[in-house]
């Protein structure tokens, strides 16, 4: 059960560098920040859905909890960087 949760949390590995890159792009061009954020949300959704589709865990509820935990961690990092 813990393995599925950890597998869900592993989605942070590809999303953290991608989100950092997009946030740097948004800081350079603040006028386009709404469009950049929408692109980031769409790409994050594609990455998360494809990761969940390819993993196909035995206990999907625990896996989804791991995914939601990873999304929470990533959102907190984004908010922290945007506030600075």
Image (spheres, grey):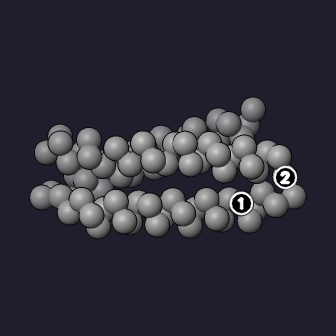
Question: For residue 54, which quarter of the picture?
Answer: bottom left
Q: Check disc 2 and report its element: helix, strand or loop.
A: loop
Q: Position of residue 82 (x, y in %)?
A: 72, 41
Q: Check disc 1 and report its element: helix, strand or loop.
A: helix
Q: Are marks 1 and 2 in contact (CB under 8 Å)?
A: yes
Precedes in sequence: disc 1 or disc 2: 2
- Tell me what residue is drawn at x 20 percent, y 48 percent: 4
Image side of residue 48 versus residue 42, left or right:
left
Image side of residue 79 versus residue 35, left or right:
left
Judging by the rendered image, the residue that carries numbered circle 2 is 29
- Tell me what residue is drawn at x 26 percent, y 41 percent: 6
Image side of residue 43 versus residue 68, left or right:
right
Residue 14: numbered disc: none
Residue 36: numbered disc: 1
Question: For residue 50, which quarter of the picture?
Answer: bottom left
Q: Position of residue 44 (x, y in %)?
A: 51, 59
Q: Residues within 10 Å of mark 2 (few under 14, many from 20)?
A: few
- Tell me what residue is drawn at x 75 percent, y 62 percent: 34
Inter-mark Cα distance, 1 to 2: 9 Å
Figure check: 80 above or below 40: above
Residue 62 or residue 37, whichever sits in front: 37
Q: What is the quadrant of the C terminus in the image?
A: top right
Image side of residue 70 versus residue 1, left or right:
right
Q: Position of residue 36 (x, y in %)?
A: 71, 60
Q: Position of residue 45 (x, y in %)?
A: 48, 64
Q: Is residue 36 something one can see in this rendering? A: yes
How many numbered discs, if any? Answer: 2
């Amino acid at each position: 059960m813990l393995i599925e949760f950890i597998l869900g949390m592993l989605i942070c590995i590809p999303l953290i560098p991608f989100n950092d890159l997009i946030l740097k792009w948004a800081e350079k061009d603040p006028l386009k920040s709404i469009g950049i954020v929408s692109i980031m949300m769409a790409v994050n959704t594609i990455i998360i859905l494809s990761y969940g589709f390819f993993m196909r865990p035995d206990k999907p509820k625990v896996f989804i909890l791991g995914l939601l935990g990873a999304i929470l961690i990533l959102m907190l990092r984004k908010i922290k960087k945007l506030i600075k």
